Image (cartoon, grey):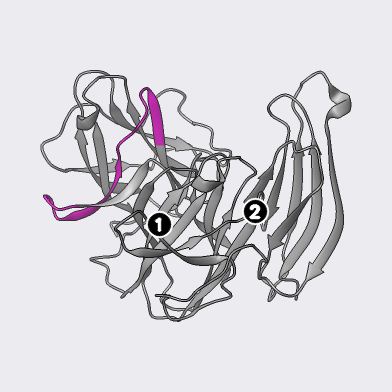
Amino acid sequence: TSVGRVDLKVKVSAEECCDYLKIFVNGVLTQERRSNGKFESVSILLDPSVENSVDFVYVKDSSGSEGDDRVWLKDFVFRSETSQKAAGTFDGGRLPVGFSDIKGWGPQPYRPGSDYGFGHIKLPDNGVASFQYTIPKGHGALLFDLFTSTEGPDRFWVFDITDKKTVLMTASGKNSRSQRRILLDPTRQTTLLFQYQKDQSRDEGEDRVWLDDFELEAVDGSTISPLEIAFNEDYRHPAVTMESPWQVVDDQKYKVTSIASSLTEFNRTTSILVALPEKFSHVNFRFRLSVENGRDGLRVYPLNEGLRSLVGGDSVFTATETTNGYVDVRLNLTELPKESRYLRFAYFQDSSERRGEDRVLIDQIRFEVDGQ
């Protein structure tokens, strides 16, 4: 306890593609380092009020030049403070009440002619900047706009310090703007850590993250999504995850807020992982599918703790034809394999030409036990 930050130097010397060092905090992946050939400074943020576990995992592939495959860790320093020193200044502006410890974040426009958001400016290679926001109890959700302009392995994530879990993570994305919602436990105070890490890619001018229009939502079951959603490029993350091409959208025609996928690449599958509760008998959800020809479709698979499919290439639900509005689905889950830990909602888009018509929207995912 009392340690809020660990500073150290890391060197990864590897060749080929797949050697890397992973750093986990309390079981949650927070950083990855690939070959760099020199020692670089790394900072790991912790909750100083509790004991923390930091795991350094080095993965080596089967490449032949084994003599070059090494990882070094040295110069560990344990600090009580959690703030990050980073280039850039904070010039004031429209911060929501309660934000503190802002270093390296400043107001920058989304694009010419638009309003301003709080963006990271001139973060050095492999630099990290973060700030914390403490939300008093009594609120149901935090909403904000997120705009990313990054390339390479840059990552932005939000970590719930109170509950020790990642609640949002984004992959790289150029000029991608969306509204994000983080569900809160209204019975307790919640402290969230917002953190952005920049890699050593050359196109530094494109590496930015902007945050804006923070709102706290009241506790209202009709307006708060029943899902805790964390965004991530791949669904191997231990939290309940949603891949980056999925977005939370407002469908004005049908008056609902849905999770939607509209892919930008042909022949690709994107997935949402939903963790199964301890007790369940059925899952209810609504979906709307807009596809043409081809093999586009929505499929639902059960996965085990290791995120392996338990039914091979089969699915427990499949939809491949365009629907007229939303369709309500109630699946019996009592016969799932005992090892089931997640449901994977997978949407596949083929290479048909009318990409603008290929959509799936999912709404109101709810688990049921004993009719409740």
Q: Which residue is mark 1?
A: 146
Q: For numbered disc 2, what is the local secondary structure?
A: loop
Q: Which residue is drawn at the image coordinates 27% and 68% (left, top)?
A: 221
Q: Which residue is mark 2?
A: 124
Q: Nearer the viewer, mark 1 or mark 2?
A: 2
Q: Residue 12: x and y, percent? A: 79, 39
Q: Are marks 1 and 2 in contact (CB under 8 Å)?
A: no
The answer to whether residue 317 of the structure is visible from this angle is no
Q: Measured along the vertical axis of the image, is residue 120 above or below residue 283? A: below
Position of the C terminus, as image quadrant, is bottom left
Q: Residue 87: x and y, percent? A: 63, 62
Q: Residue 218: x and y, percent? A: 31, 75
Q: For numbered disc 1, what is the local secondary structure?
A: strand
Of residue 163 and residue 127, the one placed in the foreground of this image is 127
Horizontal side, residue 95 vs residue 263: left or right: right
The answer to whether residue 301 of the structure is visible from this angle is yes
Q: Residue 20: x and y, percent? A: 72, 37
Magenta region: 251-270
Horizontal side, residue 263 vs residue 173: left or right: left
Of residue 116 and residue 197, the one placed in the foreground of this image is 116
Of residue 149 and residue 153, the one placed in the foreground of this image is 149
Q: Which residue is drawn at the image coordinates 52% and 40% (left, top)?
A: 151
Amino acid bearing label 2:
Pro
